[in-house]
Image: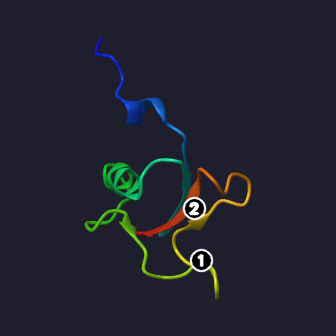
């Protein structure tokens, strides 16, 4: 078995999926979060894409996690 890369060791990646939206909390770089979501099935041809919408008025996408603001961000994806 191959040894894990530094990014694989930082596998803090939590997803909450709904019908057409998903939220992610992760300490991984944004590019890695997007790549992992693109590889997840979602039931649409476009797949999961990083949403241009805000979480709610005044809360940008992405934004720092309230529990771990120094290491984690929350991302909003749409299908």
Check whether the beta carbons of the residues at disc 1 and disc 2 lie within 8 A of each other. yes
Q: Element at badge 2? A: strand
Q: Residue at x 41, y 58 (%)?
A: 30
72 or 34, which lies in front?
A: 72
Q: Residue at x 30, y 11 (%)?
A: 1
Cα–Cα span, label 1 and label 2: 9 Å
**Looking at the picture, how far across and down is residue 61, in whole percent?**
52, 74
Q: Is residue 69 above or below residue 76?
A: above
Most extreme residue toward the right, as rendered? 67
**Looking at the picture, how far across and down is residue 79, in whole percent?**
39, 69
Q: Is residue 20 above or below residue 56?
A: above
28 or 17, which lies in front?
A: 28
Q: Which residue is mark 2?
A: 74
Question: How busy is the neighbourhood of tag 2: few (under 14 within 10 Å), some, or many (20 plus)?
Answer: many
**Looking at the picture, how far across and down is residue 55, in whole percent?**
59, 77
Q: Is residue 12 above or below residue 32?
A: above
Q: Which residue is mark 1?
A: 55
Most extreme residue toward the left, as rendered? 45
Q: Which mark is residue 1?
A: none
Q: Element at badge 1? A: loop
For marks 1 and 2, the one nearer the N-term is: 1
Most extreme residue toward the top, as rendered? 1
């Amino acid at each position: 078995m191959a040894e894990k890369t530094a990014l694989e060791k930082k596998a803090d990646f939590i997803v909450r999926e709904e019908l057409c939206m998903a939220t992610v909390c992760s300490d991984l770089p944004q590019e890695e979060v997007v790549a992992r979501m693109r590889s997840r099935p979602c039931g649409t041809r476009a797949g999961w894409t990083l949403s241009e919408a805000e979480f709610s008025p005044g809360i940008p996408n992405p934004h720092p996690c309230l529990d771990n603001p120094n290491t984690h961000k929350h991302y909003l994806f749409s299908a």
